[in-house]
Amino acid sequence: MDMKNKRPLMERLKRGLRLYYLHLIRMKDSPHKVAGGMAVGVLLAILPGMGTIAAIVLSSLLRLNRSAAILGTLILNPIAQIPIWVGSYPLGSLLMGQGWRISSDVVEKLRELQHVSFMSVTGFKVYCKVIGKVVMTGGMELLLGFTLITLLITSLSYLITFKTMIVYQSKKRAQLHSHKG
């Protein structure tokens, strides 16, 4: 048996996150372009029906880092979208003065996604159909909450990536200057 499969799950996750982090900070581009690419990727990963190809196209049009956009789409996948959709309705309800409530109709529709394979065309169609039903059931509360959560996650991805790039590039410059002197 392969040694890679014998490693504990947490160890593999930590290693994967470390490799992702190293790939991100070593990108040779401005912090704004890398962070912008990351935010575009995260945004398009959250939106139903969007993904890697859309992230590449949009980041190219905006002249942002395409590799960061691709990595951003990998952060959020369809499984991670479910908690975003579930949390959107109560947040929107709260903001519309209806209190923090969860629609049983929305939750029931989202349960349809539990066993959907997102790696097939059929699974993707089912996913889009269910999300469409969720939006029609949840209405304005859902859209308001979803918009705010999406803006928050996208903004945080930009800010965290931007700050990380600034710190890393400053350390690299300091190391280069210390080696020259």
Image: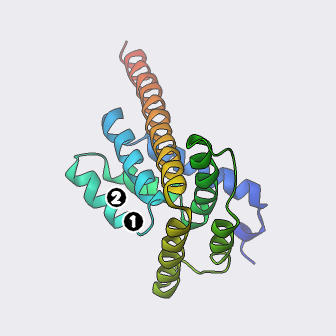
**Residue farthest to the bottom, as pictured:** 122
Front-most of residues 28 and 1: 28
Look at mark 1 in the image and give the residue it sits on: 50
For the N terminus, the image quarter is bottom right
Front-most of residues 61 and 175: 61
x then y, percent, for residue 30 = 31, 34
Look at mark 2 in the image and give the residue it sits on: 55
x then y, percent, for residue 85 = 58, 59
x then y, percent, for residue 108 = 68, 72
Task: Name the amino acid type tagged 1.
Answer: Met
- Label 1, secondary structure: give it: loop
Task: Name the amino acid type tagged 2.
Answer: Ala
Q: CA distance from mark 2 to mark 1?
A: 8 Å
180 relative position to 89: left or right: left
Count up the numbered dots: 2
Q: Looking at the image, is mark 2 or mark 1 earlier in the sequence? A: 1
Picture layout, residue 41 above or below residue 159: below
Mark in the foreground, 2 or 1: 1
| Res. 171 visible in picture | yes
The residue drawn where x is 44% and y is 60% is: 47
Front-most of residues 143 and 83: 143
Q: Residues within 10 Å of mark 1 (few under 14, many from 20)?
A: some
x then y, percent, for residue 51 = 40, 65
Q: Residues within 10 Å of mark 2 (few under 14, many from 20)?
A: many
110 relative position to 43: left or right: right
The residue drawn where x is 73% and y is 68% is: 3
